[in-house]
Amino acid sequence: MSNDPLLQPYQLKHLTLKNRIMITSHEPAYPEDGMPTDRYRAYHVERAKAGVALTMTAGSASVSRDSPPVFNNILAWKDEVVGHMAKLAQECHDEGCAVMIQLTHLGRRTRWDKADWLPVVSPGHEREASHRAFPKKMEDWDIARIVEDYVQAAERMKAAGLDGLEIQAYGHLMDQFWSPLTNDLDGPYGGSLDNRLRFTFDVLRGIRERCGEDFLLGVRYTGDEDLPGGFDAKDGLEISRKLKDSGLVDFLNVVKGHIDTDAGLTDVIPVQGMRNAPHLDFAGEIRKATDFPTFHAAKIPDVATARHAIASGKLDMVGMTRAHIADPHLVRKIVEGREDDIRPCVGANYCLDRIYQGGMALCLHNPSTGREIEQPHMIAKADTPKRVTIVGAGPAGMEAARVAAERGHKVTVFEAADQPGGQIRLTALQERRREMSSIIAWRFDQCEKLGVTFNFNSFADEADVLATEPDVAIIATGGLPHTEVLTSGDDLVVSAWDILSGDMKPGSNVLIFDDAGDHAGLQAADIIAATGARVEIVTPDRAFAPEVMAMNLVPYMRSLQAKDTTFTVTWRLTDVQRDGNGLKAVLGSDYGGVTRTREVDQVIVNHGTRPLDDLYFDLKPKSVNLGEVDHEALVAGAAQKVATGPTDSFQLFRIGDAVAARNTHAAIYDALRLVRTV
């Protein structure tokens, strides 16, 4: 048996977990009509097959009709959920993986205009900032009804064959009872800490009575709200002891903080640029004080940190949830001694930010996650090796090279720069986004192991590509910033890339016109503001930086608000004019009829990129498919067979920003689904 602390079994009551790594509860928003169907099941089974000891489904499954999810959660209040969960549990059990679920009532953390338009309920009337619903203060019959809903949902999960469940108690109804900030009730459920915990113990007692001792039961909770007027770490420790001493629970799953605002949520679940494992020591203190099975997850993206968490005795089970979104085969690679092959989580948080905007969770640089059925994680070998030539070593080109090499093809890559990376090289220059470089570094390492030939400092032309005698040529040359968006004065502006690269020095009074809404505009603002300059970010949108999304926005806001930065929405930059030694920027409005001016010394335009596609069009008439892509075949996962050009020639494709300005995920997804059939 291995001496690796992570690979040691753990005995949780009657259940033997085969190692110390778990996937904590989270909702990838894959259900259909609230049911965990094929996509949802395939996601968890993939990770079970690779060796994770425990997968905790749902984050969180709703127990009541008046707890409508604000994104696509499992509806545990429906009887039909039993069959779906039973199938998921059985398939995971077949792989030696335990299965649990997280149950919740959202309380005020939802909206009144979802699902059945029932009133939002909470122990008080205080609105949650994130979801904006003013709740009804719960009555005695609401409490009794919801306790029974929890119990019945738990019975469904036991009937489905799950090993157990946990109750969610941070930001949801359960700890809305706990917190003095949200509990205004009198009598048995309000006032003292024991009264505020009464609802929790009513639920736990009811579940234990109906489901028995052989059904594992835990609580995932915040041990410190970290909010003025809320309960603190001292209270949290007392809550922890009361949970243990109740004899009703089998484990504690500890977090720290609050999630009622974007900033609070991001501190609980840190993103790129924030420190790793910020609450691990806090969880360790709870475990030491209670001497009780303790689980925890919060930005533990790497094996070394996870190993330390177990070896040091801080945790009994370590959650590596986003790490498994990036690489579902993480445990298998540890077992096989292949840790350097683990695809790293880069903390981009594309997964969570997407679900909070109504999409399903996707990994920024693993497009197979959530698409396990149509885009399997394993790449099959091709029947016939081919010569594949790729121009461009950004994320699209590097993924194309990796997948082609996995297929067994002979791969040649041309890159104009002296190293791979493309736009990610610029992005990763800023310390906060340094982790993005791992997207390229991992692919480069994999390509080198697979024998890919790289030609750096090579601005490939048509002759260079043809000299490789390709069967397939893939153009992944990316794009260049597009700044020609004004009625006049295009020659007076610079791009966000100019600032990121250091090609242009920041001014002292700067207007940034951000019409792309992505990271580049905010990164430029951050760099400029750090010099002490005055910065105004102007956008024609109703909100700025919509492509950055909520949780990724938090670190930018903390930095920019601390400096001389102004945010101006619903205005469009129309003209820039010389004005003595400075510039006059003219702002107009899509709503019409008004203009404003700004006197500045520098104007930055962030308007996305335009394809760098000259080489593609040079090669197009010589290709067998004339560059055409069969979209039906692409989506269906079938090989490209268009043959409208010269016979006995090469197939030609372009991917990523060489097609149109999108994002890193789109570029990598382009490459994966195209090349896996080559």
Image (cartoon, rainbow, N blue to C red):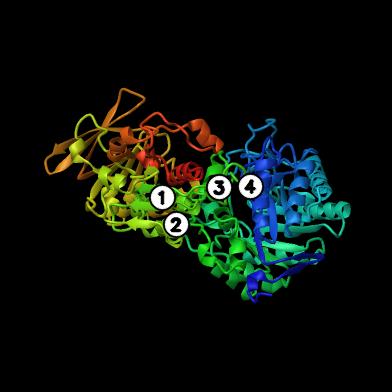
Compare marks 3 and 2 and give the one earlier in the sequence: 3
Q: Residue 368 shows which numbered tag?
A: 3
Considering only vertical position in the picture, is 119 above or below 244? above
Within-10-Å neighbours for mark 1: few <14, some 14–19, many 20+: many
- The residue type indicated by label 4 comes to Glu
Q: How many numbered dots are placed on residues in this image?
A: 4
| Quadrant in the picture for residue 141 | top right
Compute the Cα span from label 1 to label 3.
Answer: 15 Å
List the residue tagged with mark 2: 443
Inter-mark Cα distance, 4 to 3: 17 Å
N-terminal-most mark, 4 or 1: 4
Q: Position of residue 350 (x, y in %)?
A: 50, 48
Label 1 close to label 2 by CB (< 8 Å):
yes
Amino acid type of the residue that numbered disc 1 sits on in the rendered structure: Pro
Say whether residue 626 is left or right of residue 52: left
Residue marked by disc 1 = 395
